[in-house]
Amino acid sequence: MKLRYKLINRAKGDDLSFFWQMYRLRQRAGTGFWRGVFSLLLLRSAHRHGGYVGPGAVIYGRPALPHGLHGIFISQYAEIGENCRIYQNVTIGEVDGRAPSIGPDCLIGAGATLVGGIRVGRGVKVGAGAVAAQDVPDYGTVVAQPPRIRLPQHTGSHEAML
């Protein structure tokens, strides 16, 4: 990537490379002094980008954040699978020390809220502004308020249609 684009992304707050480096270093540090140092740097970086990632949050891979970390809150008890796409102002919050476990390949729309010890399956889509407080099966879609879970439509075989 050209230097110009790197500088623009850094100025806009969209360059999260330092943030993810600190996150991975903190995960590997275990406990003690160095974990505290990496946590401090990570929290300062998250604050600069306008978001929060709890110190105990487990994030596999590097989620796609099209609008940067702007307004994203991830509880310290949350677990996020690989290849997730999370838009701005999303809250992945806790209730009584339990937070969502989000499967891989999920899309979480702008302003969505996921709370409590729920399980969000693989390939789930959570619409913008939706609130999820119950388990969502694989490839389901959560829309509107109150939340409605829509399961994918399965077409029958060609033999059943004849």
Image: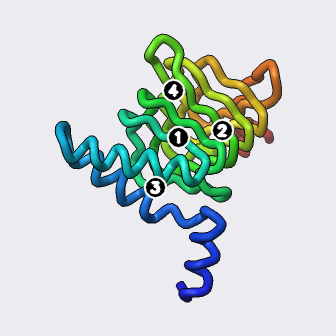
Indicate the colouring scheme.
rainbow
Q: Position of residue 143 (x, y in %)?
A: 78, 31
> As drawn, is 151 to the left or to the right of 95?
right
What residue type is disc 3 on? Arg
Quadrant position of residue 22: bottom left
Who's the residue at 48% across and 11% down the image? 96
Residue contact at pointers 1 and 2, CB within 8 angstroms: no
> As drawn, is 104 to the left or to the right of 33?
right
Q: CA distance from mark 1 to mark 3?
A: 15 Å
Q: Nearer the viewer, residue 105 or 94?
A: 94
Q: Position of residue 127 (x, y in %)?
A: 75, 38
Q: According to the image, label 4 marks what residue?
A: 100
What residue type is disc 2 on? Val
Q: Position of residue 147 (x, y in %)?
A: 76, 22
Q: Earlier in the sequence, mark 3 or mark 4?
A: 3
Residue contact at pointers 2 and 3, CB within 8 angstroms: no
Q: CA distance from mark 1 to mark 2?
A: 11 Å
Quadrant placement of the C terminus = top right
Q: Position of residue 145 (x, y in %)?
A: 81, 23
Who's the residue at 40% across and 47% down the image? 60
How packed is label 3: few (under 14 Cα within 10 Å), some, or many (20 or more)? Answer: some
Who's the residue at 42% across and 27% down the image? 77
**Nearest-to-viewer mark from 2 and 3:** 2
Q: Is residue 145 visible?
A: yes
What residue type is disc 4 on? Pro
Q: According to the image, label 3 marks what residue?
A: 62
Q: CA distance from mark 4 to mark 1?
A: 16 Å
What residue type is disc 1 on? Tyr
Residue 52 numbered tag: 1
Please tell me whether residue 103 is drawn above or below residue 2 in the rendered image. Answer: above
> As drawn, is 157 to the left or to the right of 54?
right
Mark 1 lies on a secondary structure that is strand
